Image: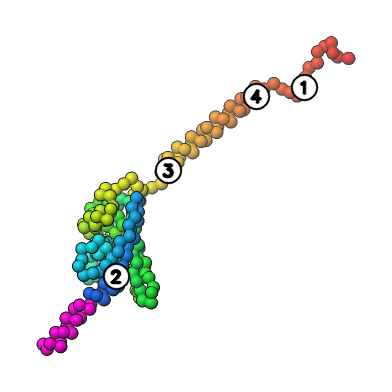
Amino acid sequence: MTRLTLAIAAFAALALPAAALAKGPTEGSISGPGFSKVVKVLYDGGGGSAGDNLTQESGFFPAAFGQSPDPMLQSKPAGPLGPRYTIAWKVPGGGGSMFRIRQDLYPYARGGAVTYTKPGQPIFDMSTRGGWYRDPELKRTLVSLGLPASAASAPSEGSGFNYTLVFGLVAGGLLGAAALLYVLRQRGQRSPSTSSTELPAGSRT
């Protein structure tokens, strides 16, 4: 193998990762119950930054572009997912355009933090592969960014509307209105009639 061939191969090895990273996000905004954070993604080659870790541990690349072997989960994880958070990624496109990819984030899911990326979100000349992804290190990174280690009191994914509370309030209001109406009717029946007045006998002419 000539020196020229070796140089071309080395350049290609460096160029391919750079091209892949150029298609990645530059910023992620995390929001949810009691937490909000904007994280910059640097791709500085050093690795280990919070933004770089977040792209890897949230499964952004396989969820957006697909990957072989495919690390995405086959289906939605079983068990409670806990409060839902959101990662809104900004991915620069050509000509100053910006693609925005959303991931649903469940840091406190049973079995470890998971993300869900909706399929079909536009990115470059394709759309997201989408799906569920789990990484045991994701929660640790989120906690390092300020997320509480345990879930705060917040509605969980799939929690239903509190029909019992609403029914109790409505029933109580109806009973109160019925009682008030009954009292008013009783007072009306006991009031003296004002339709006619009997004159004393001595006053008749």
Q: Residue flagged by tag 4: what amino acid is it?
A: Gln
Secondary structure at badge 1 equals loop
**Pointer 4 with pointer 1, Cβ within 8 A:** no
Give the alpha-carbon distance from disc 2 to disc 1, as whole Å.
Answer: 93 Å
Give the alpha-carbon distance from disc 4 to disc 1, as whole Å.
Answer: 17 Å
Question: In the rendered image, which quarter contains the C terminus?
Answer: top right
Camera-nearest label, 2 or 1 = 2
Residue 73's tag is none
Residue sitting nearer the eye, 180 or 135: 135
Seen at 48% across and 34% down, the residue is 172
Secondary structure at badge 4 equals helix
Q: Position of residue 199 (x, y in %)?
A: 80, 16
Residue 196's tag is 1
Give the alpha-carbon distance from disc 3 to disc 2, as whole Å.
Answer: 44 Å
Vertical position of residue 108 compared to residue 197: above or below: below
| Dot 1 or dot 3, earlier in sequence | 3
| Dot 4 or dot 3, earlier in sequence | 3
Which residue matches tag 3?
A: 163
Q: Position of residue 118 (x, y in %)?
A: 34, 63
Q: Position of residue 64 (x, y in %)?
A: 30, 68
Magenta stretch, residue numbers: 1-16
Q: Position of residue 187 (x, y in %)?
A: 62, 24
Q: Residue flagged by tag 1: what amino acid is it?
A: Ser
Vertical position of residue 16 compared to residue 160: above or below: below
Most extreme residue toward the right, as rendered? 205
Which residue matches tag 4?
A: 189
Q: Residues within 10 Å of mark 4 (few under 14, many from 20)?
A: few
Which residue matches tag 2?
A: 24
Q: Residue flagged by tag 3: what amino acid is it?
A: Tyr
**Pointer 4 with pointer 2, Cβ within 8 A:** no
Vertical position of residue 32 compared to residue 46: above or below: above
Residue sitting nearer the eye, 114 or 167: 114
